[in-house]
Image: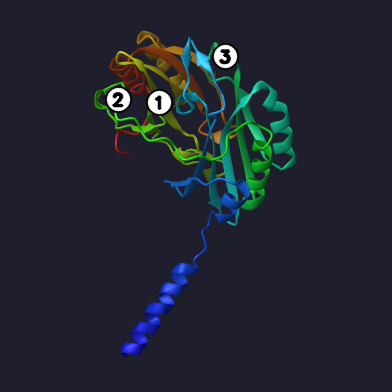
Amino acid sequence: MRVLVVWCGLLGSSLAFGQSDPWKAVVDNLGRSGKEQPGEVYKVGLPRGDMHVTVDGIAIKPALALGSWVAFKKVGAQTMVMGDLVLSEDEVEPVMLKLQQGGIEQTALHNHVLHESPRVMYMHISGHGDAAKLATTLHDALALTATPPAATPPAAPTELGIDADAVGAELGRKGTVNGGVLQFSVPRCEKISEGGMEIPPAMGTATAINFQPTGNNKAAITGDFVLLGSEVNPVIRALREGGIQVTAIHSHMLTEEPRLFFMHFWANDDAVKLAKALHGALEKTNSAPAGK
């Protein structure tokens, strides 16, 4: 009996060790690794640390507004990929051509901020098919850009420069620090779908709010509100009343249900004051309550 138990244990161990990583082909062909997110999403961040962009004299950190990303999700026997590529103007055409040749489509191409120098474009993408082939196409497209190779992220600073707890208290949520930027993600209450497939918040359907400290308890903020059409103008008014500029309103997808609009914004002011204004704007939306 003892021998049988040991043998079964060894068999169980060999099966465990033999399990394949479902995202190995993506990592191998893309040449970069990511992290699993809620909703069975595998997301890969591609910060554009090579870009030296300023907005209103502020040097923008990659985590504030220069973070390309791609996210993969298994859908039956196929894989869906969505993403947002941060590109220089000269990179747009060659990247678009390479993606089209590999079967990955563009769903939007536009600005997110205003008065940036040099000019930055944002290309939203969508594709379905074999995970390895999708990753290979993305690898070949990224090779046409100056996107840096994966690197060990720098250690988080001991002092962020703003009171993250006070900012979070005003927003009613807890943020995370990434690359010197305090980030918040606020999903919507509705189930978002495209082509009959659910699009989880990790694939770009959650409101993103980012704070980059700029000194004296101030922060530059940007991100995007994910909105229904009926919410667009109430949110504009709430942001404007709080001294926050709206920098773009547009789509990121093509056939999503319900129809969504993405509103980008900008301000540089007292971080807690801005958090209060952003909270007021979130109150105009059907966003999920904190902790959901």
Dot 2 falls on a residue whose secondary structure is: helix
* Amino acid on which disc 2 is placed: Leu
Vertically, is 43 above or below 124?
below
User: Which badge, 2 or 3, is on the more N-terminal residue?
Assistant: 3
* Amino acid on which disc 3 is placed: Ser
* Amino acid on which disc 1 is placed: Ile
User: Which badge, 1 or 3, is on the more N-terminal residue?
Assistant: 3
Viewer-proximal residue, 83 or 207?
Answer: 83
**Residue 220 appears at what percent x and percent y?**
40, 17
Which residue in the structure is indicated by mark 2?
171
Dot 3 falls on a residue whose secondary structure is: strand
Which residue in the structure is indicated by mark 1?
209
Residue at image location 30% in from the left, 21% down from the top: 162
**Quadrant of residue 9 within the rendered picture:** bottom left
From the viewer's perspective, tell me whether residue 191 is left or right of residue 133: left
- Which quarter of the rendering shows the N terminus? bottom left
Disc 2 from disc 1: Cα separation: 10 Å
**Quadrant of residue 174 within the rendered picture:** top left
Q: Are marks 1 and 3 in contact (CB under 8 Å)?
A: no
Residue 117: mark in rendering: 3
Residue at image location 46% in from the left, 50% down from the top: 40
From the viewer's perspective, tell me whether residue 96 is left or right of residue 70: right
